[in-house]
Amino acid sequence: MLHYKRILLKLSGESLAGEEGYGIDARVVDRYAAEVKNALSLGAEVALVIGGGNIFRGLSSAAADMDRVQADHMGMLATVINSLAFQDALERKGVFTRLMSAIKMEQVAEPFIRRRAIRHLEKGRVVIFGAGTGNPYFTTDTAASLRAVEIEADVIVKGTRVDGVFSSDPEKNPEAEMYKNISYNDVLKNNLRVMDLTAITLCRENLLPIVVMNMNVEGNFVRLLSGESVGTLVNQGGR
């Protein structure tokens, strides 16, 4: 029995870059695709939102002198590149997929239509949401929250390179405390940067739980869906 049936998995663009820090590491994408396939074998329905920071980030130094709207549109297109790479990795493993874009590009992706996305999930297809919300000034975290609410997901799983949510950056502070459970309000009050303000608020208003976990630990995703205690749960009650 799955603890979560319908999941939106949020991955950063940087996570696809592996140790290089930029571009796409095919080995990392293949490993993540294997995790998703294993989840499907248990009966889970999986949707994905992938960032574009490994290719272009609208708020980066490279975009410092650019028009913000122009830079954000470049970032949205970067998410589509990552989505295509992940789609290819999944399909090479025999997984049926659909890529849906918030920006019209019929040659490579379907337009986002909520009912169609839900139907794809019900048929066992992995749905990848590209191009963010289609609007500037909104992050892919916010896009993930919005799409998760729209498809009536049971949870957002944010796959990271750390084990969960900590009191401070565990890569800089070895004494940082990891929370097993924390409330939306405490995340906002302590500025813990689980997701951006808009994304957290949207989850809070819709009582959509968030799990932050280490996607680089093999089997973590399946263990989480099976009900094991993995990562940090962010919800209304907290600790």
Image (cartoon, rainbow, N blue to C red):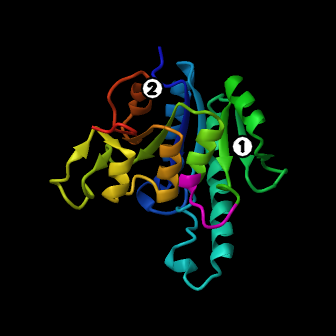
Which of pointers 2 and 1 indicates the residue nearer the eye? 2
> In the rendered image, is residue 88 in sight?
no
Q: Position of residue 137 (x, y in %)?
A: 61, 67
Q: Position of residue 119 (x, y in %)?
A: 74, 28
Residue 225 image label:
2
Stretch of the chain drawn in magenta: 135-142
Q: Is residue 49 left or right of residue 99?
A: left
Q: State if disc 1 and disc 2 touch (CB < 8 Å).
A: no
Q: Quadrant of residue 48?
A: top right
At 74% from the left and 39% from the top, the residue drawn is 114
Q: Is residue 208 left or right of residue 216?
A: right
Q: Position of residue 95 (x, y in %)?
A: 65, 29
Residue lying at the far bottom in this picture: please name it.
65
Task: Give the camera-side residue of 195 and 207.
Answer: 207
The secondary element bearing badge 2 is classed as helix
Residue lying at the far right in this picture: please name it.
106
Q: Residues within 10 Å of mark 1 (few under 14, many from 20)?
A: many
At 51% from the left and 74% from the top, the residue drawn is 60
Q: Given the image, on which type of amino acid does mark 1 rest?
A: Leu
Residue 99 image label:
1
> In the rendered image, is residue 102 in sight?
yes
Count the marks: 2
Q: Quadrant of residue 74?
A: bottom right
Q: Main secondary structure of the magenta part?
A: loop
At 49% from the left and 38% from the top, the residue drawn is 207
Q: Is residue 18 left or right of residue 49?
A: left
Q: Whole-Å distance between the Cαs marked 2 and 1?
A: 23 Å
Task: Give the camera-side residue of 115 and 106.
Answer: 115
The quadrant the C terminus occupies is top left
